[in-house]
Amino acid sequence: NKIYDNAAIKQSIIEDIHGMIMRDEVDAGVWQALLKSKTIDEDGRILIHLKDYTTHVKQLKFPKQKTENRLIFLLNIISNHVDQTGLDPDLNPKIIIIDKNTGTDQSSSQWHEELHQFLQIKHGCKLSLVSLKAVFISNVSYLKLYQNLYGLSGTLGSRDEKQLLNELYNIDLIKIPTSKPKNFFEERPIISGYKEQWTNSIYDETKKKIIKDRSVLIICETVKHVDYISKCLVKRAMEDLQNDPSNIIYDSLKKPYVYKREHEEFTFGQGNELLNCGTVIIATNLAGRGTDIKLEQKLVEAGGLHVIVTFLPNNCRIEEQAYGSAA
């Protein structure tokens, strides 16, 4: 007798790494439909990766609603509950910290005092061990270990920051001018006293710019705010569209481009695709951090990209990063 079932172990490992549907998880008819539509391969490995499989499954036209709902749930769970940063192949759901300042996933970090483990229990995740740092060294002490220091920064450079860097590391600072002059105009800030006024101001300002054939980048503090603002904008646009069905600007407002997580593809990032007129982008600070958005000539002539920062950042560096997205 075999002590170990090597085939089962291999299958389990592949399932954890790639995400698979097992034959015994679905009916024979569903399995064949998934194969025919090339949703999975012969081994059950998922070939089509989507954020939400609802539309895809509905196109397969299963006779029973129950079968359809179960398959949507199964595919969404397998594909979307994993760490997408590329640092961890484990398919178990995780609690991942998102940095407010940068919008990046801090997949290797934990909240202290067992808060992380509490949230894992609350959301039904696998418990991880409490992370304890036996040896700790500050960035300042670490950098002082080097005999020679050299660094570049696109946003450090205020008088206080220069003075602090000089005191800490006894270094010279040189300002290198940008290859092109800054080309943006900062409008008067709008301060909102309550949430409804806040979302109305964002919608009204976005609408004004879209009417003028400009595009708008709305930067939010958190993923939750991205979802909330996008829902509010779509709702307002749909209401206005009913009152004025001939106005085409509501098409842009009711279909914003949403960018929330680091693993998601940002079409306009790093100049991969030119941004055209009338586009609304709602994102975390990921879209404002080190992102070079290239504009179509028509959009440049219309006034360029309008950036709305929907929160008051902790420091001016975040604002500078946002304003530098295209100007």
Image (spheres, rainbow, N blue to C red):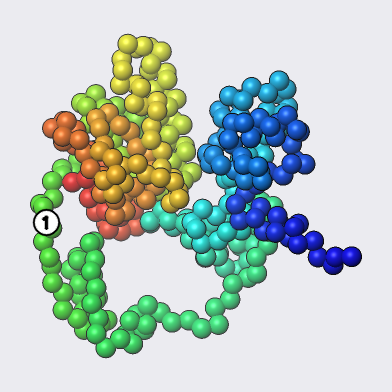
The answer to whether one can see residue 209 in this image is no
Does 142 appear above or below 318? below
Judge left or right: residue 37 versus residue 24: left
Does 243 appear above or below 238? above
Residue 58 horizontal/vertical position (percent): 60, 25
* Mark 1, other Cα within 10 Å: few <14 / some 14–19 / many ≥20: few
Q: Residue at x 65, y 42 (%)?
A: 42
Pick whichever, 42 or 274, lies toward us: 42
The answer to whether one can see residue 166 in this image is yes
- Number of callouts: 1
Q: Residue at x 76, y 57 (%)?
A: 8
Q: Residue at x 66, y 30 (%)?
A: 33
| Amino acid type for the residue under numbered disc 1 | Ser
Which residue, given by chain and number where applicable, does mark 1 sit on? 179
Residue 190 horizontal/vertical position (percent): 28, 39
Instruction: Give the quarter of the figure containing the N terminus.
Output: bottom right
Check disc 1 and report its element: helix, strand or loop: loop
Query: Which residue is at the far right?
Result: 1
Pick whichever, 191 or 23, lies toward us: 23
Residue 286 horizontal/vertical position (percent): 37, 50
Does 80 appear above or below 158? above
Residue 172 horizontal/vertical position (percent): 16, 79
Q: Residue at x 47, y 38 (%)?
A: 227
Does 158 appear above or below 208? below
